[in-house]
Amino acid sequence: MNSPTLTHQYTPRFLAYLVALLFSFACIQAPVHAAMIGTDTLVSEAELVQQRDALSAQLLRDDVKKELLALGVNPADVTERVNNMTASEIQQVQGQLASLPAGSGLGTVAVVLLILILLEVAGVIDIFPKL
């Protein structure tokens, strides 16, 4: 018993329809909506970038970095977490940093603990088990 083979002859008319169909699909375009970007949006984005850079600079000072390394936290994780922070989180951290006494060892410890808590909440590190 011979098995039937599938041989199909494509006619030129069929190929012409197929090509026309493909070209008609290629010509379909999705609608695009564009709007003007307001100055306030650009300013707020620029301020957010500036606040992130300032916070990163504060958190990656040599004394803070030394404390982070002593606690086993990679400074690259801190940078990544700061880059993923929202504007409200950055303002909250900067407000807490502004309330700390300047130049004291206690301030450095408080900053490091604040960073550790933020990294713990974000799930980047697991220093405080069962919190």
Image (tube, rainbow, N blue to C red):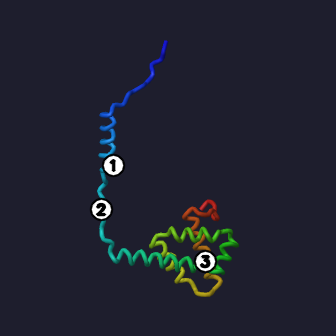
Of the pair 72 and 16, the residue shown nearer to us? 16
Query: Which residue type does callout 3 highlight?
Result: Leu
Where residue 119 appears, as percent x and y from the top left, is 58, 67
The numbered mark, 3 or 1, whose residue comes first in the sequence reads 1
Where residue 116 appears, as percent x and y from the top left, is 60, 70
Q: CA distance from mark 2 to mark 1?
A: 20 Å
- The residue sitting at 30% across, 67% down in the picture is 35
The numbered mark, 2 or 3, whose residue comes first in the sequence reads 2
Residue labelled with disc 1: 26
Q: Residues within 10 Å of mark 2 (few under 14, many from 20)?
A: few
Residue 72 is marked as none
Residue labelled with disc 3: 60
Q: Residues within 10 Å of mark 1 (few under 14, many from 20)?
A: few
Q: Residues within 10 Å of mark 3 (few under 14, many from 20)?
A: some
Residue labelled with disc 2: 33
Where residue 74 appears, as percent x and y from the top left, is 64, 69
Query: Which residue type does callout 2 highlight?
Result: His
- Give the number of the mark in front: 3 or 1: 1
Quadrant, the C terminus: bottom right
Q: CA distance from mark 2 to mark 3?
A: 41 Å
Of the pair 17 and 89, the residue shown nearer to us? 17
Q: Residue furthest right?
A: 70
